[in-house]
């Protein structure tokens, strides 16, 4: 996998002046407009380093493949003629400026980031939400670009630099990239999974089934870009750390201190940009892959990142409120997701896989919700005021998402559609249906009915939330006509996905689970899954990210309050927002209910559902007493919240830590810092036993000596 390169250049080859200039230019510009712009530097440097030793060369939608059908074979690997690139990519050119009719030039690569340009590249001036690539054309040429693709003439460029004027350079990029890299997705069995929740686990399950069918399947998604055990860069090269990781010698972080985030593997987006998609799949193809399972985000679809990816199977998991800060409303969000299915046109090869389960099932809510356990009271829910839930942006409960996406896929007229379900109301309609699911905290045993027959399988994934994901992956296997015994073997070979209902075991007598749930629906599903395993109390730790959809915060607070016995509202990724304001937005989902509890009304003289830092020192003891009474805690420091939750758990309880999942960082301001829920939870499990054995009572906050009078002070960090 040496840089996933098609060239045979050696790692010892000297980097020329143009490549050196590109490296030096890394510090000369501001970052782009992607989701984690402040962390792009290492990815850009890796791209330059990988491409300095070669570029992927492939062998293909409407995009032709450069060199396909040529008998002479004289073309140098990784090199194309500029005019041919546009011809094979099917990109209309408005004007060839500074390039005569009889002239052409060789290009050895494509770049859409001036910091990653190498000598011989053609630079494409993409326009983002914050940055316009046209403003960086001069820097790209200085770094070695031999031509510029732009939507308008750039006056600052000299007459020596050809400018290819097109209608929209951003939409031209995927076509040019697919043509240059050989349209790799056409040579792979390509499965795209979209939906609000379940994408990551479903793609991992699909990979397991395809691997069981003797296909070498790559993976593109939130947890990384992988081929087997090899981590890949967004440009298709093998990832290697650029600097030492200072966290490797540490058991955990330190409370109140932001640890450096260095030397760790990360990917910029769930779905890479249009250029990276082609580079990544070409790199996988060059190194033996014959399939890829890809998470396809709504952002990626709206921004055209997968415009020239040739999907064999498109999967819809579900649609609930999320990303409205980007899309504006649910209708626009839904239409973005539908783009994946509207591109399916080949009935001989392509398939759509659609979930028939309702997104919101009121009967399920009633079944899984649990009666609030009012502290020091046997009174039931009638004591709490009957307040209506906040109205969603759109009545999604009444909208038939399944029918919408079936229509988007052509209603069976364009391509065959395979449906799946787990809800009994859909048992007769679904092609793939989970007839039975036995849940435990260690595995999930399912009986699945398919058009090819039934099978039983024991899967290492836990929680009811994963039953639907299993059904989705089985439906993909059915769509690809994989034998039933192979599908079952793939399901059984499936290992837990990092940060997706991940069970942590340090020998404790109760389960601790880390999950990525960061939407109201995902949180509801995660808590309900744990509840159905028969535990006595579900203790939930969660928060909401800053600079993201504000509207879902109070909904998540309401969901956690409704379904959990003990709740810790804490920090997530505050980014540039005030973390205390985020906590307040979440608490708004249950504040009125708690404040109107009779025992609380008799005691509370001030608003107490706040972090201690916002409470006057004279009132902190009373605040802690009131939070103990209602079992609703507000802690800005996630370090303390995780330890407080784990310390409260007893043998028949379960701790569910939600929101960050696989993420090993916290974003404060515009910078990442090391913080991993799994690391912190494991550290807590190892150390809190000793705290308890020393005589500390950890069932309430603050911790104190067993049998001691109140007022011992907070010794949680002992």
Image (cartoon, rainbow, N blue to C red):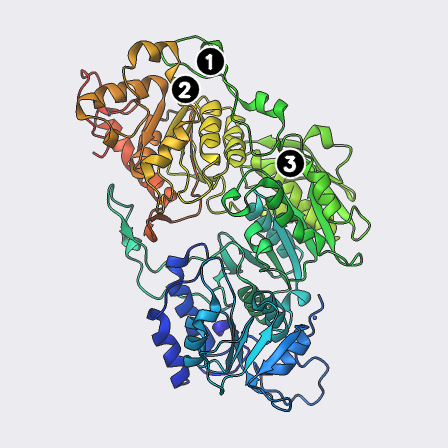
User: Can residue 485 be seen at all in this image of the molecule?
Assistant: no
Residue closer to the observer: 710 or 206: 710
Q: Quadrant of the C terminus?
A: top left
* Label located before the other in sequence (2 or 1): 1
Residue 255: quarter of image: top left
Residue 311 - label? none
Residue 56 locus on image (x, y percent)? 55, 75
* Discs 3/1, front: 1
Q: Residue at x 38, y 59 (%)?
A: 39
Q: Which residue is mark 2?
A: 592
Q: Which residue is mark 1?
A: 385
* Discs 2/3, front: 2
Residue 446 - label? 3
User: Can residue 466 be seen at all in this image of the molecule?
Assistant: yes
Q: Do tag 2 and tag 1 residues touch (Cβ < 8 Å)?
A: yes
Q: Is residue 315 left or right of residue 233?
A: right
CA distance for labels 3 and 1: 40 Å
Q: Residue at x 33, y 69 (%)?
A: 27
């Amino acid at each position: 996998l040496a840089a996933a390169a098609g060239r045979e250049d050696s790692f010892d080859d000297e980097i020329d002046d143009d490549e050196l200039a590109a490296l030096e230019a890394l510090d000369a510009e501001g970052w782009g407009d992607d989701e984690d712009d402040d962390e792009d530097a290492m990815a850009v440097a890796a791209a330059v380093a990988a491409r300095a030793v070669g570029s992927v060369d492939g062998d293909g939608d409407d995009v032709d493949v450069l060199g396909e059908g040529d008998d002479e074979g004289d073309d140098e690997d990784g090199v194309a003629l500029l005019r041919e690139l546009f011809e094979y990519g099917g990109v209309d050119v408005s004007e060839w400026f500074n390039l005569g009719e009889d002239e052409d030039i060789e290009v050895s690569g494509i770049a859409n980031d001036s910091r990653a340009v190498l000598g011989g590249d053609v630079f494409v001036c993409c326009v983002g939400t914050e940055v316009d690539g046209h403003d960086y054309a001069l820097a790209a040429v200085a770094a070695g670009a031999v031509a510029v693709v732009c939507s308008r003439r750039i006056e600052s460029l000299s007459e020596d630099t050809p400018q290819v004027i097109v209608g929209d350079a951003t939409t031209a990029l995927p076509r040019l990239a697919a043509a240059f890299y050989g349209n790799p997705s056409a040579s792979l069995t390509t499965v795209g999974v979209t939906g609000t929740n379940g994408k990551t686990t479903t793609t991992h399950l699909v990979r397991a089934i395809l691997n069981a069918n003797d296909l070498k399947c790559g993976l593109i998604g939130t947890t990384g870009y992988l081929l087997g055990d090899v981590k890949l860069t967004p440009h298709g090269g093998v990832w290697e750390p650029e600097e030492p990781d200072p966290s490797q010698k540490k058991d955990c972080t330190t409370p109140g201190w932001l640890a450096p985030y260095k030397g760790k593997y990360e990917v910029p987006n769930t779905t890479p940009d249009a250029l990276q998609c082609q580079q990544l799949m070409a790199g996988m193809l060059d190194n033996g892959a014959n399939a890829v399972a890809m998470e396809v985000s709504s952002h990626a679809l709206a921004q055209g990142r997968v415009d020239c990816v040739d999907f064999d199977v498109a999967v819809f998991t579900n649609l609930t409120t999320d990303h409205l800060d980007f899309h504006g409303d649910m209708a626009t969000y839904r239409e973005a997701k539908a783009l994946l299915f509207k591109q399916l046109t080949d009935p001989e090869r392509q398939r759509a896989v659609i979930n028939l389960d309702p997104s919101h099932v009121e009967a399920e809510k009633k079944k899984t919700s649990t009666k609030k356990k009012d502290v020091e009271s046997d009174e039931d829910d009638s004591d709490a005021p009957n307040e209506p839930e906040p109205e969603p942006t759109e009545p999604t409960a009444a909208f038939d998402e399944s029918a919408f996406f079936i229509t988007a896929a052509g209603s069976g007229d364009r391509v065959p559609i395979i449906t799946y379900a787990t809800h009994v109301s859909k048992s007769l309609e679904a092609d793939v249906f989970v007839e039975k699911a036995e849940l435990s905290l260690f595995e999930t045993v399912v009986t699945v009915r398919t058009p090819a027959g039934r099978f039983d399988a024991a899967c290492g994934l836990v929680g009811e939330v994963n039953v639907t994901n299993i059904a989705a992956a089985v439906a993909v296997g059915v769509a690809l006509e994989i034998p039933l015994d192979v599908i079952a073997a793939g399901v059984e070979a499936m290992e837990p996905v990092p940060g997706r209902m991940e069970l942590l075991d340090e020998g404790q007598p109760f389960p601790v689970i880390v999950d990525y749930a960061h939407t109201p629906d995902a949180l509801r599903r995660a808590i309900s899954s744990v509840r159905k395993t028969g535990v006595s109390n579900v203790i939930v730790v969660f928060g909401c990210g800053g600079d993201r959809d504000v509207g879902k915060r109070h909904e998540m607070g309401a969901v956690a309050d409704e379904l959990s016995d003990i709740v810790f509202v804490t920090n997530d990724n505050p980014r540039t927002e005030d973390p205390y304001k985020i906590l307040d937005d979440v608490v708004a989902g249950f504040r009125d209910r708690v404040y109107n509890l009779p025992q609380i009304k008799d005691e509370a003289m001030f608003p107490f559902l706040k972090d201690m830092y916002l409470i006057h020192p004279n009132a902190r003891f009373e605040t802690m007493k009131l939070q103990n009474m209602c079992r609703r805690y507000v802690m800005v420091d996630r370090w303390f919240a995780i330890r407080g939750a784990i310390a409260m758990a007893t043998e028949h309880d379960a701790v569910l830590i939600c929101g960050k999942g696989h993420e090993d960082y916290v974003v404060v301001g515009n910078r990442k810092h090391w913080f991993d829920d799994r690391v912190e939870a494991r550290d807590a499990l190892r150390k809190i036993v000793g705290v308890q054995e020393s005589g500390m009572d950890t069932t309430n906050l603050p911790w104190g000596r067993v049998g001691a009078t109140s007022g011992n002070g907070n010794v949680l960090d002992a």
